[in-house]
Structures are given as structure tokens and as C-alpha cells.
Amino acid sequence: MTIDPQKLDRLAEVAVRTGLNLQEGQDLVITAPVAALPLVRRIVAHAYKAGAGVVTPIFSDDEITLARFENANDQSFDKAPGWLFEGMGQAFKEGAARMAIKADNPMLLAGQDPDVVGRVSKATSIAAKPAMDPVVGMQVNWNIVAYPTPEWAQMVFPDLDEEAAQGALMDAIFAASRIEGGDPVENWAAHSAVLRERVDWLNSMAFDALHYTGPGTDLTLGLAEGHIWKGGATLGKNGVTFQPNIPTEEVFTCPHAFRVDGTVSSTKPLAHNGSLIDGIQVRFEAGRIVDATADKGEEVLRKLLATDDGASRIGEVALVPHSSPISQSGLLFYNTLFDENAASHIALGQCYADTIEGGGTLSPEELKQKGGNGSIIHVDWMIGSDQIDIDGIGKDGSRTPVMRAGEWA
């Protein structure tokens, strides 16, 4: 498959200049599957053009990952390379930026024992904390961008042959990443300004809660004390303004982990750890999911919710209009980076500390007192559609339309 080299170069440039806003002399740590090597090479070139210190890529490989599940002894599944994550964490402490390239086969582990997959995921999440905490805490500038592998492409476009599917997925990634037409860096500046308008309005309203209604959904979601809405460009604690996700269509904040009540249904499938979870319906009481079902992948969902004490509470709420380009494409990407930007969503697990006033200086217990959730997981799933209405509820009980039929009101 020949991917348009000019467009690939534009994507790499946007990832470095807008996504990371890489600084002169700053080191960069990249994680990527070996299948994404063409994009990694272009990103490295643009990083050095931007004045990078040292760029260090760390590669994974689907076949190597699968070999572990097919051949390793049972003890292997509860281990993870903590030394690697500690090294990455040290790099971030010393000022390095973080780039992740998503290109994995979403269903790679579909044929594996969900219990074993869950054990590996849990061990990796625990070991990865030294590397993930600086990212979740916005202490470093970071970015996630995507590259199409043939296996992923054929999931999204099952009726096309391998070469045509990969080309179609690359075109879809380019379109969603806003690199078509004009200067992509300027495209992102304009898009970020629109998201900023939404963020400013939501912050000015200072809602106490959001109320969602629609098919299978009647949910009152409290917002954390001192919550801050964010979206688009983000100011990191290192003083660098960066764009975490390419693409992005969301504005998001911190829900109150102990003030969520009612029922909510998923509106799109969730691809998680090689399994597809579809038709999710859950019931919250005092912030915790007390009943959960799914039409497909229910066992995987239940194991996810049992990961730790915070896995059955939520750490993020995000608003995305139904008219977003990713939604209007009609595609299911089987990749949260894209699918979460097709619909409003919530995330099980860890909150982002910087979505609470002063969150970066608060201890885990102080974050909890304000409503922030703690967990080793952070898994987004979609609850928005053109049939969902959302009202903002003020501290005085007043109601303000936020979304009607999936669009900003």
C-alpha cells in the first residue's frame, strides 16, 4: 500500500508542531507499533527540525504480543516491565515530551482468554504508573496520533481488499485529523478556538450537575467541586501549550465520583483489550455502577469494572456534538482515539487532576474529597447520539439546555 507521502508528512508535522508543540532542546519519547514505522520516521524528522534534543522510539509488535498469550507460562501474565516505565517516568521528570502512535489491531486478542487478557492489562496498568502519572497530570506535553495498519483497516472497511481498506482508513485518518486543505497548523488553531468558546461558556455557567435523557438513559451526573472544563489546546504544568489528541472534538471535565445516579446506555460499541463490548447498560447509585449488562462482551465489561475500587466510578465526562466530522463519517473505528470523538462519552476510572482547580497540587485523598476518582484504568465509552438531550443543573436547581438531539443548544 502506497500512502500519500505528502499527507503523511503533513500529519507528522501537525503532530510535532501542534500536537506536542515540541520545544527547542526538548527530548521526546515515542511509543509505536513497528507497523507505524513510516509515520514514526516522519515524526522523528520533524522533531529534529523543531530542535529536539534526543528522540527515543520504543516499538511494540502485534505478533510478539500474541506470541506471549499463545506460549508463555501462567506466571507471565501477572508481570510487566516496570523498569521500562520507570525509565520513561524519569525521562518525563527531566523534561521529555511524550508521543504515542495508535496503529494496533483492535481485535488482536479477541481469541484469547478474557481473564488472562485482564490480568496482563492490570499488571501493565500498575507497572505503568510512573510513566502515566506525569501524562494524566499534564506535567508534560504529550500527543496521540494514528496510523492505519492493514488489520485495523480491514475491520473498519470489511468489504474492501487489504490495500483498498488501508487507503480508505488513511484517508479517514487524514480527514479526521484536519490536515486536508490549507495549512493544517492554522486549521488546528481555528478548531481549537471553537472548542475554547464552548469551554469558556461551560466554565462561566459553573453547573452543579448534568442531566442526560434519551433511549435507555436517565442519568444525573454531578460535577466535581471546582471542576474546570477543558478542550482543544491545553497548557501543561511545564508551561507548554499542546494538543493532546489528534483528532479531538470534545470538551471535558471531572465528574463527581460519588454523585452519579440513574441509568445510561452506550450508543456505540467499545473495543477493549481485543474484545468488542456492545449494548452496554449500567445503573449508578451514589456514583458507583451497581448493575451492568451488555448485549456482547458482558464478561469483559464485568472484569473491567472489577479492576480496582475506582473502576466502577467515572473520572471524565465529555461533550461531543453529533455533527462532529467523525460522527458524520458513519464509521466505527474500533479505536477510542476516534470513536470517543463521534459522541459524548464518559470514562470509567482515573480522573484528570488538571480538570479540578489546583488539582495538580492536591494529594489523592484531597482530590477524592472534591469528587475526583482514582483508578489504574481510564476507559472511555460513548453515550451520546442525536436522540440524547443534556441539561445543565445549577446549584439553585435551575436548568439550562446544553444539548438538544445531540447538538449544542
Image (cartoon, rainbow, N blue to C red):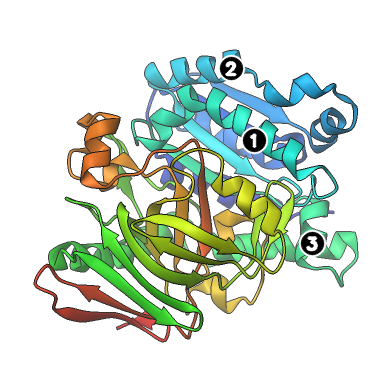
Q: Amino acid at mark 3?
A: Met
Distance from label 1 to label 2 (Cα)? 13 Å
Looking at this view, is 132 or 211 the one in front?
A: 211
Q: Nearer the viewer, mark 1 or mark 2?
A: 1
On screen, 269 above or below 372? below
Query: Which residue has dot 1 on it?
Result: 121
Q: Residue at x 41, y 29 (%)?
A: 133
121 left or right of 218 in image: right
Q: Nearer the viewer, residue 122 or 30?
A: 122
Tell me the CA gap for discs 2 and 3: 32 Å
Residue at the image point whose x is 28% and y is 47% from the top: 355
Specify whether 37 is left or right of 308. Answer: right
Identify which residue is drawn at 15% across, 68% down.
Answer: 205
The answer to whether one can see residue 380 in this image is: yes
Categorize mark 3 by other alpha carbons within 10 Å: few (<14), some (14-19), many (20+): some
For disc 2, the marked residue is 82
Q: Tell me residue 303's x, y (percent).
A: 63, 46
**Left or right relative to 221: residue 129:** right
Quarter in which the N terminus is drawn: bottom right
Q: Quadrant of residue 122?
A: top right
Please tell me the numbered disc located at residue 155. Answer: 3
| Secondary element at image label 3 | helix
Distance between mark 3 and mark 1 Cα atoms: 22 Å
* Dot 2 or dot 3, earlier in sequence: 2
Comparing labels 2 and 3, the label whose residue is closer to the camera: 2
